[in-house]
Amino acid sequence: MALFNVLVVDDEQEFRDMTIKRLIKRDIIAEGVESGELAIERIKHGDIDVVLLDVKMPGMGGVAALREIKQIKPLIEVVMLTGHASVESGIDGMKLGAFDYLMKPMEFESLHEKLCEAYERKKIQQNKIEQAQIKHDMFFFPG
């Protein structure tokens, strides 16, 4: 049984393919796209739990994509990937609602752990919303 769905958004194909392969080995449903624009389209039409999002990409960068993702599906957790030169972008991402950011290159274990933590937070938020909905329905539509 797969744990959760991850969308890897990175214009470096080798990194994207390797990350997806390693996540799948851990029973995580993983797929990838190479741009912020494609990520937005995929998120609109799919069941994604966590996005691994590179900050620096041609076209729509990671911070702009994050802003869009949070507008479309606020519960999706986003982990930003940043190089040394763009740490500030990672911090900007946190201000816009990213779960966290990781510096490239990183150990796969650290990446895997961060994605799992992000998914846990998404599950907690989803449960809170579902519980509030149940209480609301019980109040307005008793017995």
Image: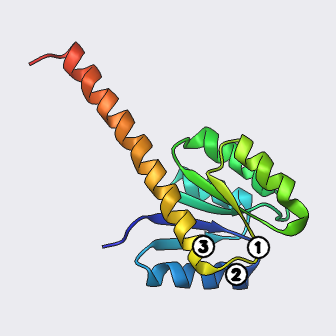
Q: Amino acid at mark 3?
A: Ser
Q: Amino acid at mark 2?
A: Phe
Spatial CA span between label 2 and label 1: 10 Å
- Which corner quadrant of the image does residue 52 belong to? bottom right
User: Closer to the observer: label 2 or label 3?
Assistant: 3
Q: Which residue shows up at 61% across the image and 51% down it?
A: 99
Decide: is 23 above or below 97: below
Can residue 98 be seen by looking at this rendering?
A: yes
Q: Which residue shows up at 8% across the image and 19% down it?
A: 143
The residue carrying mark 2 is: 15
Q: Are marks 2 and 1 in contact (CB under 8 Å)?
A: yes
User: Closer to the observer: label 2 or label 1?
Assistant: 1
Q: Which color scheme is applied?
A: rainbow
The residue carrying mark 1 is: 104
Spatial CA span between label 3 and label 1: 11 Å
Provide residue 75's location: percent of width, then percent of height.
51, 44
In the rendered view, does 104 fall on the left or right side of 7?
right
Spatial CA span between label 2 and label 3: 15 Å
Provide residue 63's location: percent of width, then percent of height.
77, 51
Q: Residues within 10 Å of mark 2 (few under 14, many from 20)?
A: some
> Mark 2 or 3 closer to N-term?
2
| Residue nearer the viewer, 50 or 90 | 90
The residue carrying mark 3 is: 110
In the rendered view, does 124 fall on the left or right side of 84?
left
